[in-house]
Amino acid sequence: MVRLKQRYILFDILYPPEPNGEEFDTFSDSPRSALLSLYQSSSTSINPKTLTQVIRKILQDHYGDFGAGTAGMSVSVKYFNNKTSTGILRCSRQSFHLVMASLTLLNRIGKREVIVRCLHVSGTIKKCEEFSIKRNKNLMLVVKQGKKDNSNGVNQFINNFGQNEAFAIENDVEDGSDE
């Protein structure tokens, strides 16, 4: 019997400032204030069940019956932390590209506008957890250093962020490993 292989996607939810709010005026004062305003706690109404339903709806809306049939039923949010707005999603290996695309198409949860980023893709949930812990430690160090030396660490984190994340996804997924 053949084992069904899964992929685990680590994602986070960022909250951009409302255009009419007070946060919008102070958002670009410094890179540190921008990071702190983007990384907010999620409301308690956001839980794994509601995220799974929203993702399935986006798959249906953007990819039709094909997306809903191939990826929709294999999608489930295994972990979501409201304090850090970080979650781990499980999907089938064949359809993880559709699921990643649908996560990026997600721009509203409830009445709040959001930005969802896929941070890491792995064959095991343990590797996603390890990556999340390492990333959060680095982010905390950068924010603490930003207080001391006028946010040079934050600028470095922002500049290197996309390169490190893309490198991690390419090495983990495209090497053909079946973890």
Image: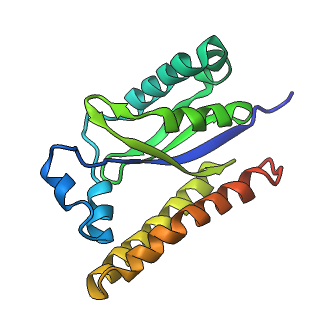
- Count of labels shown? 0
The quadrant of the image that shows the N terminus is top right
Residue sitting at 62 percent across and 11 percent down?
65
> For this view, does 131 lie left or right of residue 115?
right
Q: Position of residue 60 (x, y in %)?
A: 54, 17
Q: Position of residue 8 (x, y in %)?
A: 61, 44
Q: Nearer the viewer, residue 160 or 43?
A: 160
Q: Position of residue 178 (x, y in %)?
A: 80, 47
Residue sitting at 43 percent across and 25 percent down?
54
Q: Nearer the viewer, residue 146 or 134?
A: 146
Q: Quadrant of residue 145?
A: bottom left
In the image, farthest residue toward the left: 22
> For this view, does 12 lie left or right of residue 23?
right
Q: Nearer the viewer, residue 20 or 178?
A: 20
> For this view, does 151 lie left or right of residue 10?
left
Residue sitting at 46 percent across and 76 percent down?
156
- Depicted 75 relative to depicted 133: above or below: above
- Depicted 53 relative to depicted 5: above or below: above
> For this view, does 20 lie left or right of residue 70?
left
Q: In this figure, which colouring scheme has been used for the structure? A: rainbow
Q: Position of residue 163 (x, y in %)?
A: 60, 65
